[in-house]
Image (cartoon, rainbow, N blue to C red):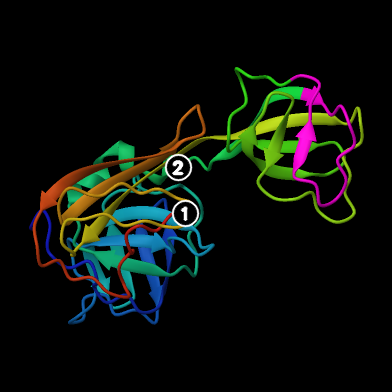
Amino acid sequence: MALWGNNDNVGSAGTVSLNYATRVVTGTGTSFGIAGGLSEGDVIRFGTRGGGGIYYGDAVVVSVASSESLTIGSTMGLSGVAIAGTDFTVSQLPKSSVLDSSYSETNFVAPSYTNIFFTSATIEAPAGFTTVALNDMGTDVIQVGDHLVSASGVDTPIASIGTTGVVLGSPIGAGLTINAGTAITFTRLVDGYDKIVYGISTTVGSKTLPSIGYSGYQHSGWVGVQTYIDNHGNFRVKSETLVAMSGISTGDGSIAYPTPV
C-alpha cells in the first residue's frame, strides 16, 4: 500500500454513514471499489468543507466489502460527531496525516468573541454616526479590528482609535442610538484552531480571500495548513509541506485551497 498518491479528486458519488463502533461505512449510491471510485488505501474525507457545511475529518480505508460498504482503520482523525447521510470526498493524501493528532477534527475550535474592555459613552451618537466618544479609552487594551458592542444593540468593528473616542467601521444602524452613559463593551475575536491537508497542483505562489490573509505556500504537493487567531486577534496561517510534488489531480471532488471553515 503506497504512502500517498497523486489524486485529490477520486470519484465520490453518493452519501455515507459511519458506525463509529465497528468503523464500517455504509454508502448510498456509492461506487466503492469500482474503477474511478474509492479503493483500499485511499483517504475518505467525511462532510463538506466550507460554504456552511460540516466537516467531520479524514480516515484511511482499510478494506472494501462492496460498492456500498467499506471499513476504515481508525476514527482518531474524526470529530466524533455522528455521520449519517453525509457527502464525502476521496483523496490519496499522505496517510500519515490521518494518524497525526494535530490534524484530527477533535482539535477544531471555532473562533469566538471575548470581552476585553468595558466603558461608557460620554455623548449621544445617533443612527448614521461613525464616531463614539468614550469615558475611558482603554488605550493599552483596545485595538483596531476589535468590536464595539453597546447596550443599545450596536455591534460594529473599530476602524480607528482617537484620544477621546473611536471611529466605527460602519455607521450606527437605523433605529439605534448610543446615548450618553450607555454601557460599551469591546470584544475581540480570539482562539480558533484548524489544520487540514490540501492537494495543491498549481505553481508556487500565494492566494488570498477577502478579509482573510492566507500566506503563500512553499511548494505544490500535499501541504498541511494550520490556521488560528492569536491573542491579539490576528489571523495566522502556518503551512508544512508533507510531500513536495507536481502533477496532483484536483477538481470538483477536491477541497479547494484555501477553503476556510
Whether residue 171 is visible here, answered yes or no, is yes
Q: Residue at x 78, y 35 (%)?
A: 132
Position of 31 relative to 226 (above/below):
below
Can you give x and y, in whole percent of width and height, for residue 213 in the image? 40, 48
Q: Percent from the top left, x then y, of residue 207?
A: 31, 57
Q: Position of residue 54 (x, y in %)?
A: 50, 59
Q: Quadrant of residue 134?
A: top right
Q: Is residue 170 left or right of residue 89?
A: right
Question: Vertical placement of 193 versus 34: above or below?
Answer: above
Are dots 1 and 2 in contact, CB under 8 Å? Answer: yes
Which segment did they paint magenta? 119-136
Q: Amino acid at mark 2?
A: Phe
Three-letter amino acid code of the residue under disc 1:
Val
User: Which residue does the numbered mark 2 point to in the structure image?
Assistant: 108
Q: Residue furthest front?
A: 163
Mark 1, residue position: 261
Q: Pointer 2: residues within 10 angstroms few (<14), some, or many (20+)? A: some
Q: Main secondary structure of the magenta part?
A: loop
Residue 11's place in the image compared with 96, above or below, is below
- Which of 144 and 23 lies nearest the eye of the viewer? 144
Residue 234 is situated, as x and y percent measured from the top left of the image, at 46, 35
The quarter of the picture where residue 189 lies is top right
Is residue 125 magenta-colored?
yes
Report the residue at 65% width, 46% height from top.
169
Q: Earlier in the sequence, mark 1 or mark 2?
A: 2
Q: Residue at x 12, y 57 (%)?
A: 4
Is there any visible trace of residue 61 in the rendered image?
no
